[in-house]
Image (cartoon, rainbow, N blue to C red):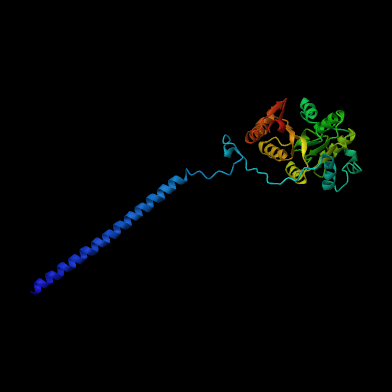
Amino acid sequence: MKEIEDQRSLHHNQKNLVNVTMKLFAKSTAYVILLLLSYALGYLSSTTSYSYTPPQPHTDDVPPTVPANQLDNFRVTTRCADSLPSQLVRQTIVDRIFNATSPYANFPPPHVSQLLRTKRVKGWGSYGGVFERLIEKVRPRVVVEVGTFLGASALHMANLTRQLGLETQILCVDDFRGWPGFRDKFKDIHMINGDVLLYYQFMQNVIYFNATDTVLPVPYSSGSALMKLCEWGVVGDLIEIDAGHDFNSAWADINRAWRILRPGGVIFGHDYFTAADNRGVRRAVNLFAKINGLQVQTDGQHWVIDSAVNV
């Protein structure tokens, strides 16, 4: 009888062991399956992350024909003030930049008077027919020139407006620092303690050609100057872009200058068909026109965008 009980007990224990084993096996199998699934998901997510394309920036103002990745991150956020009447532009610049005193007053200062030439005018493409044609067409009250150097094109425009009997104010935006190494070609431009005298020679040229009532310097970088003109409500009927010739500089200048162009005005610039093209002028002009749905016209080596024919 005892043997029968022992056999039943053994059978019962064996049955429990099988049940426990089956339960453990089921749990282990589930664990292994979960582990394999986690590994598979991790592998798949790792694989797809290499081909993930990040969201593109918001480009509602860019036509679908222009991929967003062609655009520089340059964005203009400055709010422009209401446009000033043209007759207030000169005094506004004198007040805000020169502490209400003409920069030509008591010129030249004694420490540079012996270092300046009576006149030293030099430019590139400064006498092209585009100037006369545009001035006759636009008959500007305010001209903004971005990139002046020694004032050749500004003085040429001053002479053209004078011949037409126009009362035109020409604002010359330039930091008057030239570029590193420019004195290798212009050894006659003196330097005092690292300060090249481009600004003073420019002013001397303006005085020599009796254009002080027409030509006024804005001696700052194009970015900061154009931003302030926008904030002050200074707008141009005719704007020339001829400063930096690399893509980023030209792109930034065109975008900022366009915001201060009077409706119906014209913006134009040099170096559209020259060796400087591979540094970005034409690329910047064409991209800007394409994005904004504008037409680019050419006149010699100059590009022209007439806002009156792009409305």
* Nearer-the-camera pick, 286 or 193: 286
The part of the image, by quadrant, that contains residue 165 is top right
User: Whole-percent x and y of residue 243?
Assistant: 74, 36
- Asked whether the viewer can see residue 121, the reply is no
The image shows residue 295, relative to residue 31, as above or below, that is: above
Where is residue 83 drawn, in percent x and y? 77, 42
Q: Which quadrant of the rendered structure holds the C terminus? A: top right
Front residue (pair 19, 257): 257
Residue placed at 43% from the left, 48% from the top? Answer: 45
Q: Nearer the viewer, residue 263 or 90?
A: 263
Q: For residue 256, which quarter of the picture?
A: top right
Residue 23 lies left or right of residue 215; in this view the side is left
Residue farthest toward the left in the current orientation of the protein: 1
- What is the quadrant of the N terminus in the image? bottom left
User: Which residue extends farthest front?
Assistant: 311
In the rendered image, the residue lying farthest to the bottom is 2
Instruction: Indicate the quadrant where residue 245 lies.
Output: top right
